[in-house]
Amino acid sequence: TDDESSNEKPVVAIVGAGPAGLFCALTLARDGHCRPILFERGQPVESRGRDIGALMHRRSIDSESNFAFGEGGAGTWSDGKLTTRIGRNQGPVRSVLETLVEYGAPEKILIDGAPHLGTDNLVRLLRNMRRDLRKLGGEIRFGARMTRLFVEDGIVSGLEVEYSKAVERSIGGAEVGQVYEGTERIDADAVVLAAGHSARDVYEKLHELGISLEAKGFATGFRVEHPQRIINRIQYGEEWGPSVVTGRSATDEVNKKFFDTLHEQDSSDNDTDSHHDGRLPVASYRLATDKAFDGESVRGAYSFCMCPGGQIVPASTDPEEVCVNGMSFSKRDSVWANSALVVTVSPDDPVLTEYREKHGVLAGIEFQRDMERAASAMGGGNLTVPVQRLTDFVEGVPSTSAPSSSYRLCVKASSF
């Protein structure tokens, strides 16, 4: 039978159901020469959405199912940007875009200069991917956290997985519980680690096993948030800024009133009709320099994951830490815009000297952990986020009041 022939195929265990893990499993399943088993510590998207709802409404954080962990990885509840610096029309990249369209992404991502999916589209797309992976003979198990890697004679032979309750929902909405429980050893012919950067425990276990790890450079910084109407004005000017239309009446009215007020204040507009019938998308931006001076050395500094019409969300996996991310739905119809503003940190960076002495190759992970704990302390805990007005930050003075924000779990005026 097909099941018997499938069970005789080599087994490839894949850890992590983010983009890398999902596409790895799909590629292997379509090839048909092996049986991929995908292990995801978090929940399927339909249950993950409930856990995120509990976080947003009750500040109840599930360490295994949140904005970072779960089906689709951190990007599911981020923004769904499909950006790459290796050429959008190269074969492998084009194949990824076409696969996404196959599973429900809008076809316009094949031609857009800056393709974007949005969280709402990703949820549906991921469920379609999951169903097809299983039809092709692959497996996907949720609530499945890798706790050990088995290495025999220098070769990885399998892994140990610890299961927790995971609930999927059928197309009709009925709950479908997983049959896996307890701890299980999985023997595998190959193991692919596709863990995200938040899975610190994975890297710590690899280090304990003596598996060779190499430190890589990374970027760190803050989120900067602006009213979207300000970005519309900067990018499109006062003449075309009013032409931004999202389709959400409340947001479009805010933009319209903003530009109406500007035109009333500008006497030069009295005799000029600046109305245009065209419609423009919400404006975005990108900033970058390799000449940012931090007082001691020159660094790269750049914007990252710019979310027009978006919001800022809690991306913490530990209630004692604060980390935020930006996201947008497909319509990008929020009154806010946000972006990460980050600086580069190289593996041999002086800022990591103390961490390298204590933690070796894991220095960056400990630096990240300390940063997020310090942010939590500045906010006073309970996922309250410390904020500083951009003008105060530039002038080097503390903020005495906190501006309004899209972040829903409270903000507190601070000084960075």
Image (cartoon, grey):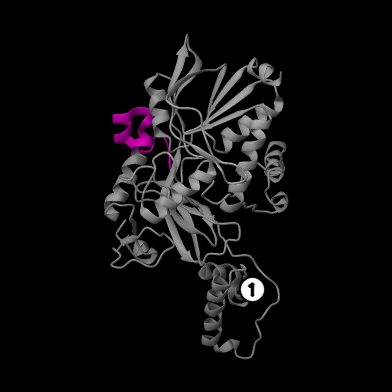
Instruction: Decide: is 47 above or below 255.
Output: above
Whole-percent x and y of residue 404?
A: 39, 67
* Disc 1 packing (10 Å; few <14; some 14–19; many ≥20): many
One can see residue 45 in this view: yes
Q: Where the C terminus falls, by quadrant?
A: bottom left
Horizontal arrangement in the rendering, residue 63 relative to residue 282 (left or right): left
Horizontal arrangement in the rendering, residue 40 relative to residue 393 (left or right): right
Asked if the magenta segment contains residue 45, the reply would be: no
Horizontal arrangement in the rendering, residue 86 relative to residue 393 (left or right): right
Q: Which residues are magenta?
A: 345-366
What residue is at 32 percent from the left and 29 percent from the top?
359
Horizontal arrangement in the rendering, residue 367 relative to residue 327 (left or right): left
Whole-percent x and y of residue 35?
A: 63, 22
Q: Nearer the viewer, residue 131 or 102?
A: 131
What residue is at 51 percent from the left and 86 percent from the top?
265
**Which image quadrant for residue 56?**
bottom left
Q: Where the N terminus falls, by quadrant?
A: top right
Asked if the magenta segment contains residue 357, the reply would be: yes
Whole-percent x and y of residue 80?
A: 58, 49
Residue located beneath label 1 in the image: 243
What residue is at 51 percent from the left and 32 percent from the top?
178
Residue ranking furthest to the top: 153
Whole-percent x and y of residue 327?
A: 51, 54
Magenta: main secondary structure: helix
One can see residue 118 in this view: no
